[in-house]
Amino acid sequence: MQIYWALWAVALAVFMAAATWIEYNAIVRRIDGANGFILLMVGIGCAMSLPLGGAIAWYYAGFTAAAEVVLITGAGLGAAFWASLHWLGARARQRR
């Protein structure tokens, strides 16, 4: 179960980091229009993986473990999304 959760968490972190990097490059190159869209779509896609990940964890480890995995992963994903938005917002204000 630990390996499953670690792989899932790493995959979500890689997706969020890639989306943040793409948005940061758009800010640096002063590309206007739809900035933040990629980060939003990746965030929604990662959030949509929570029920599937919870169902897989429930099948292998039971409801309690699945609830813990989904809550911890969801909280981490939300924190990463919030941190990315605020960091990118600060970079965008700096570039003006």
Image (cartoon, grey):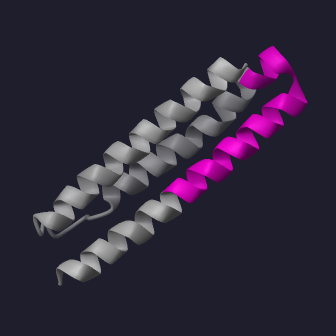
Q: On screen, 32 above or below 96?
A: above
Name the foreground residue: 89 vs 63: 89
| Relative horizontal placement of residue 62, taking residue 57 as reference (left or right) | right
Q: Is residue 77 magenta?
A: yes
Q: Position of residue 83 (x, y in %)?
A: 48, 63
Q: On screen, 30 above or below 57?
A: below
Q: Does the magenta stretch include residue 68?
A: yes
Q: On screen, 17 above or below 93?
A: above
| Relative horizontal placement of residue 76, taking residue 19 as reference (left or right) | right
Tell me where residue 63 sits by quadrant: top right
Marker count (numbered): 0
State the predominant SS element of the stretch in magenta: helix
Name the foreground residue: 5 vs 54: 5
Tell me the quarter of the image containing the C terminus.
bottom left
Q: Residue furthest top?
A: 60
Residue sitting at x 26%, y 65%? 35
Q: What's the magenta region?
A: 57-80
Residue sitting at x 25%, y 51%? 22
| Relative horizontal placement of residue 40, taking residue 64 as reference (left or right) | left
Q: Position of residue 5 (x, y in %)?
A: 65, 27
Tell me where residue 58 sits by quadrant: top right
Residue sitting at x 12%, y 69%? 30
Tell me the quarter of the image containing the N terminus.
top right
Residue sitting at x 26%, y 75%? 92
Q: On screen, 40 above or below 32?
A: above
Q: Position of residue 53 (x, y in %)?
A: 66, 29
Q: Position of residue 59 (x, y in %)?
A: 79, 17
